[in-house]
Amino acid sequence: MQLFLDTADISQITARMEGGLVDGITTNPSLIAKSGADIMERIAEICAVVPGPVSAEVVATGFEGMLEEGRRLRAIADNVVVKLPLTTDGLKACRTFADEGIPTNVTLCFSLNQALLAAKAGATFVSPFVGRIDDMGGDGLGLLEAIREVYDQYGYETGILAASLRSVTHVEMAARIGCDAATLPPGIFDSMVNHPLTDSGLKAFLDDWKKTGRSGLSQG
């Protein structure tokens, strides 16, 4: 499963790119606004340090506007994925971009019907919002399972990009369900490495090593 960071903060991105654990980035208008940056400039900055997919979202709500903005965003770099809302016009734009060979991420997915339409429109990714579904009293992880079942049954190639993940447990379950990717806030990404038994085990090993009187592995 690919792991994407859900942020437009360039410092948070660059700090986590070393080690090859981050596969891509997702952004949205809220994250760009929070960063205070110009959207075109920030997407260019991100693409300069991230070789993988970078989702950049249109803000137009009409079909023609989505096409114009999507093409402008795609012109920034070859790894830009045009992010579109799961609306009628968004799906129409998705089909046009698919026919043009432009990758897309259809976002704000809250139902299996919506995910089915995104796949039929040729979306590269569909982004079901797990946490927001749970907030409404629904079953976000259950939706991921349903989408995986239907996509596999009919051979749809659209990748399931689990979004609005609120915990490391969400990440684990997305992986077990078979999602193709998950996008995480930097804090949750950082938490994936943590486990109290790892911490206690390392402390025990180091405490035993200190008893040898050596500071490192050298014999001198």
Image (spheres, helix red, strand yellow):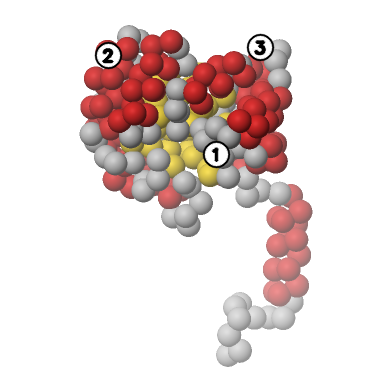
Location of mark 1 (residue): 181
Secondary structure, mark 3, is loop
- Image coordinates of residue 188 in percent, x first then y, are 58, 38
Nearer the N terminus, badge 1 or badge 2?
Answer: 2
What's under tag 2, amino acid-wise?
Gly
C-alpha separation, residue under disc 1 versus residue under disc 3: 23 Å
C-alpha separation, residue under disc 2 versus residue under disc 3: 31 Å
Which disc number belongs to residue 136? 3
C-alpha separation, residue under disc 1 versus residue under disc 2: 28 Å
Closer to the observer: label 2 or label 3?
2
Closer to the observer: label 1 or label 3?
1
> Callout 2: 10 Å neighbours few (<14), some, many (20+)?
some
- Image coordinates of residue 93 in percent, x first then y, are 35, 19
Which quarter of the figure has residue 173?
A: top right
Location of mark 2 (residue): 65
From the viewer's perspective, tell me whether residue 180 is left or right of residue 146.
left
- Image coordinates of residue 113 in percent, x first then y, are 59, 16
Q: Residue furthest front?
A: 154
Could you tell me if residue 19 is visible in this image? yes
From the viewer's perspective, tell me whether residue 73 is left or right of residue 13.
left
Nearer the N terminus, badge 2 or badge 3?
Answer: 2
